[in-house]
Amino acid sequence: MVERQYMARLNMDDNELRRRLSAFEITEEDLQRLASLRPLAERHMDGIIDDFYKLLLSHEEMRVHFPDEATVRHVKRMQREYFLGLFSGKVDLRYVEDRLRAGAAHERIGVAPKLYLAAYSRYLRLILDRVMQDVTDVAQACQVYASIQKLVHFDMALALDTYLAASIDTITRHQAAIRELSTPVIRVYERILLMPIIGTVDSQRAQQIMETVLVRVVEEQARVVILDIAGVSLVDSQVADHLLETTAAVRLLGAQTILTGISAQVARTIVRLGVEIANMHTCSRLADGIELALRMVGKRIAPEMQQRSE
Amino acid sequence: MKVPILRIGRMLLASVQVELRDTVADAFQQDVLAAIEKNGADGLIIDITALDIVDSYVARVLLDTGRMARLLGAPTVLVGMRPAVAATLTRMGFVMDDVYTALNIDEGLHLLQGIAGRRLGA
């Protein structure tokens, strides 16, 4: 089913197929020519494929992908289908899907693109050597050569597209993971949330911080959100503005923010930059921030002794 | 469509379920203010939980209504704002300094009762 996903990713429909065929200058004539070679191809198929795998198995890096006899038998069978596909005289959406499935399989088992292309180049040479033996007319040989070239490159492009799509998928997954990691919200106490902010705060991250905080405040019905900026590498006026914006938005929901983890350096920067933070609760230490938050929800931290004497 | 206005003790609760456009907005303001004028109120709660979208026009209507109610002696608390609404209003630079905000009706009621109590005590 992977190939279906790739079909969607490449926007593969009749129009896209037509555009691709025209990019590779593959005409109906090419396909007919290849189809007429089918009996020839069938005759040479086993020889070509046997030679191909002999070559692959002789190469150290390629060999690792064929751990046992059964695997070799399996891929040879697949290869036969693939090979005959070239001479089927038809390139339709099913053909593309087949090709994408092959590409996806290579990507999945971790065949590096360089090896894929290297193997393909050998494969192409073998095909041309064998098939051309039987084409005696020079002019016809040139045409056959061109047709095979075109279709093979068309196939390679599809395989590369699956490689790229898979890489992009991986990157997207990583980005999502990083995004999630970068805005953790911790429930410190009933109705008190803490968001430690670490690293750089650009506008995209700031927006994400704000959205996460707002959603969590409503979810948890939190009264107070502590934003700890001790881990923020650089606090400039832009970062300060973002924090103010988040504070204002949190207030609209009916909750309050406390800014903690402010270093002496950051305090100086904020004042020098003339950022207006008068309506923000601020503490230098997180511990003070938690105490303040508890007071806001009507609780306080008291020493154990005192509690006993009460 | 009218915005229902309920009385809870000395407080008024207006639950906005429809978009406050033109005539609806006008009627809403008039109804709220008339209710305060007629029987008096220690506070006004406007519940906007049902509003998925609040543009600057609607925000202005809400804020103005709060300001008007305060002139009549009823401080206003806006409750139940959606996260996305808060984010949008803030990004537009909309400030709601003249109204209180609370997470839900319960808290809004509590807040207003606190304010009313302080006023009586003073």
Image: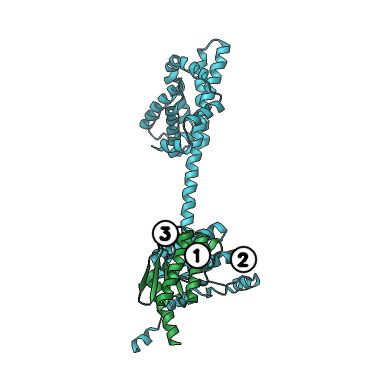
**Residue assigned mark 2:** A237
Host chain of mark 2: A
**A297 vs A112: above or below:** below
Whole-angstrom CA distance, mark 2 to mark 3, is: 39 Å
Quarter residue B15 falls in:
bottom left
Give the image location of residue A123, x and y in percent: 49, 25
Mark 1 to mark 3: distance in Å? 13 Å
* Residue A252 in the image, given as x and y percentages of width and height: 48, 67
Where disc 1 sits, the SS reads helix
Which disc, if any, is residue B18? 3
Indicate how the structure is coloured in the image.
Answer: by chain
For the N terminus of chain A, the quadrant is: top left
The tint chain A carries is cyan
Residue A57 at x, y percent in the picture? 45, 30
The label number, if any, that marks residue A182 in the structure image: none
Q: Neighbour class for label 3 at 10 Å: few (<14), some, many (≥20)?
A: some
Of all chains in the rendering, the one displayed in green is: B
Please, what is the three-letter code of the amino acid marked with disc 2?
Answer: Ser
The residue beneath circle 1 is B61
Q: Image point 48% across, 27% down: which residue?
A: A55
Whether A79 is drawn above or below A134: the answer is below
